[in-house]
């Protein structure tokens, strides 16, 4: 292919704070319609917003994890547009003074470290939700003013699969930090993709199209892939790509025009006079930085070198924090990190996949898996018996009872211990030979079929 795609992603992540961005209403999903509302988040005249400090903590943490510069001067601005589920007639966001700039997310892609630049991360409030019922529409403002961060990448991405990997890693970082639950289907993580194409070797970017409404992980790559093809076809047939916003239709796997550049909003941003400029001093950043956990890439590299497992395995084992903690405990307790990795990558992930379970619901505990490995390594049981015990514990008919026992108890109850006391084995052999003296005295012949 003589064309090269250029892609930049804008990701909205809903922050896991207890309360909303500018009021004390609960930010949790699932309450009855309009139950989590007050004069501030329903946009009543004269109601005043008060900034939730925890939102700033989480935004700083995300910025630090993505190697951003945390800016001292922050301003909240009004982004003006009318929408029925945005009762104030504007959204409070950050414009020219965002909290984080100039960052980078690094992840393993095609077996090497790949970095995507982060232009900025800013804080903003979410809108409410409209539902349409034929003749009328309803507005639910529970989500109004729930805190979001928007993470804008540089146009550094060069393929649909790279965009998918970037997004998966971004999600994994946010989950490690505990600032977002990462659920794309429920909208806690939303992605807009900006796509353009250019002839290979060209230094200038082509005209970009913004794809909105990509609400599942699977569709991010498909939507981008489709859009790249559409743009290449346009250029090849002598037409031009026009700058516009398009929507992805997963049923038909195609994108359709939503609005052109001419119809683009003029948001008339200006500083919100109801909110003071926010100063994020260096002590504040210092305090937050103490909560920065070891991140997926660093953990992956440490697992690979400390436990001598392939980077590929280490990457899978560090995809989520609970998975990494499970692995590390089994690796340390069993004293055999390689075997711990093999059991998890093979048998355990297969069982979890089949039963659609998370590692936190693992049918075998960390201690049981570690004990199982130790039992093989000490010669108490064979590898074959260990597989049998693993199956009994995780998916056999007695799994519910057996999984409450220790591995030692299972071995005992089921009489599975391998006898390696040679004296005991010799005694059994002697007894059998004595009882079968006739056969023993017969010379062994090649004709004997047994
Ligand atoms: P807007 O607010 O209109 O969406 P931004 O300046 O915030 O515009 O840019 C949005 C995204 O578009 C960024 O992620 C950026 O990397 C990406 N982008 C900019 N130019 C191009 C281009 N020519 N091709 C692909 N992506 C681009
Ligand atoms: Mg945009
Ligand atoms: Zn409220």
Image (spheres, rainbow, N blue to C red):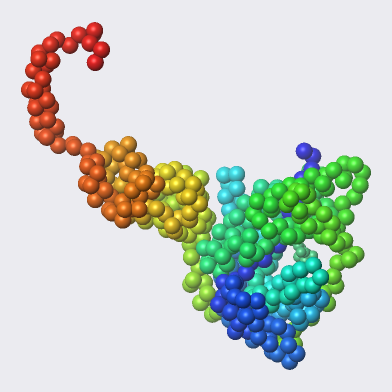
Q: Quadrant of residue 54?
A: bottom right
Quadrant containing the N terminus in the rendered view: top right
Q: Quadrant of ligand 1?
A: bottom right
**Which residue is rendered at x = 59% and y = 72% of the image?**
30
**Which residue is rendered at x = 57% and y = 44% of the image?**
111
Q: Is residue 405 left or right of residue 228?
A: left
Q: Nearer the viewer, residue 204 or 426?
A: 426
- Identify whether 317 is placed above or below 236: below
**Residue placed furthest toward the right:** 238
Quadrant containing the C terminus in the rendered view: top left
Q: Is residue 11 left or right of residue 339?
A: right
**Residue placed furthest toward the front:** 135
Q: Residue 73 at what x, y percent from top left?
A: 67, 79
**Which residue is rendered at x = 63% and y = 84% of the image?**
23
Q: Residue 359 at what x, y percent from top left?
A: 45, 55
Answer whether residue 274 is visible to the viewer in this image.
yes
Q: Residue 76 at what x, y percent from top left?
A: 71, 80
Q: How many marks?
A: 0
Q: Nearer the viewer, residue 275 or 416?
A: 416
Answer whether residue 281 is visible to the viewer in this image.
no
Q: Is residue 360 left or right of residue 371?
A: right
**Residue placed furthest toward the bottom:** 46
Q: Residue 411 at what x, y percent from top left?
A: 25, 45
**Which residue is rendered at x = 85% and y = 43% of the image?**
233
Q: Nearer the viewer, residue 273 or 428?
A: 428
- Identify whether 441 is placed above or below 88: above
Q: Nearer the viewer, residue 151 or 429?
A: 429
- Identify whether 212 is placed above or below 428: below
């Amino acid at each position: 292919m003589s064309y090269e795609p250029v892609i930049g992603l804008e990701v909205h992540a809903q922050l896991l704070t207890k309360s909303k961005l500018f009021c004390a209403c609960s930010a949790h999903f699932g309450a009855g319609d309009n139950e989590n509302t007050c004069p501030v988040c329903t946009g009543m005249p004269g109601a005043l917003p008060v900034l939730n400090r925890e939102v700033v903590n989480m935004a700083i943490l995300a910025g630090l994890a993505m190697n951003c510069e945390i800016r001292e001067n922050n301003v909240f601005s009004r982004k003006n547009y009318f929408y029925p589920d945005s009762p104030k007639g504007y959204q409070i966001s950050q414009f020219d003074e965002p909290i984080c700039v100039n960052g980078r997310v690094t992840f393993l892609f095609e077996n090497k470290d790949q970095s995507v630049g982060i232009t900025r991360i800013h804080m903003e409030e979410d809108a409410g939700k409209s539902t349409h019922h034929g003749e009328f529409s309803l507005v639910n403002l529970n989500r109004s003013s729930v805190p979001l961060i928007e993470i804008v990448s540089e146009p550094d991405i060069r393929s649909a699969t790279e965009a998918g990997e970037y997004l998966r890693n971004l999600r994994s970082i946010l989950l490690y930090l505990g600032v977002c639950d990462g659920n794309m289907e429920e909208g806690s993580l939303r992605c807009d993709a900006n796509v353009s194409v250019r002839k290979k070797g060209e230094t200038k970017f082509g005209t970009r199209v913004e794809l909105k409404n990509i609400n599942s992980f699977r569709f991010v790559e498909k939507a981008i892939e489709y859009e790249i093809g559409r743009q290449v076809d346009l250029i090849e047939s002598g037409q031009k790509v026009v700058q516009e916003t398009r929507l992805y239709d997963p049923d038909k796997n195609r994108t359709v025009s939503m609005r052109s550049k001419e119809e683009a909003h003029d948001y008339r941003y200006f500083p919100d006079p109801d909110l003071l400029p926010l100063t994020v001093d260096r002590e504040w950043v210092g305090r937050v930085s103490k909560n920065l956990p070891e991140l997926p890439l660093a953990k992956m590299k440490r697992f690979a070198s400390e436990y001598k497992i392939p980077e590929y395995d280490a990457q899978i084992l560090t995809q989520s924090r609970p998975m990494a903690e499970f692995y590390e405990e089994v690796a340390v307790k069993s004293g055999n990190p390689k075997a711990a990795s093999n059991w998890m990558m093979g048998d355990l992930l297969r069982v979890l996949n089949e039963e659609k379970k998370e590692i936190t619901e693992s049918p075998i505990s960390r201690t049981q898996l570690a004990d199982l490995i130790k039992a093989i390594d000490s010669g108490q049981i064979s590898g074959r018996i260990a597989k049998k015990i693993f199956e009994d514990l995780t998916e056999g008919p007695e799994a519910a009872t057996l999984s409450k026992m220790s591995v030692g108890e299972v071995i005992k109850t089921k009489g599975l211990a391998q006898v390696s006391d040679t004296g005991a084995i010799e005694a059994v052999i002697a007894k059998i030979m004595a009882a079968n003296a006739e056969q023993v005295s017969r010379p062994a012949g090649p004709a004997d079929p047994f």
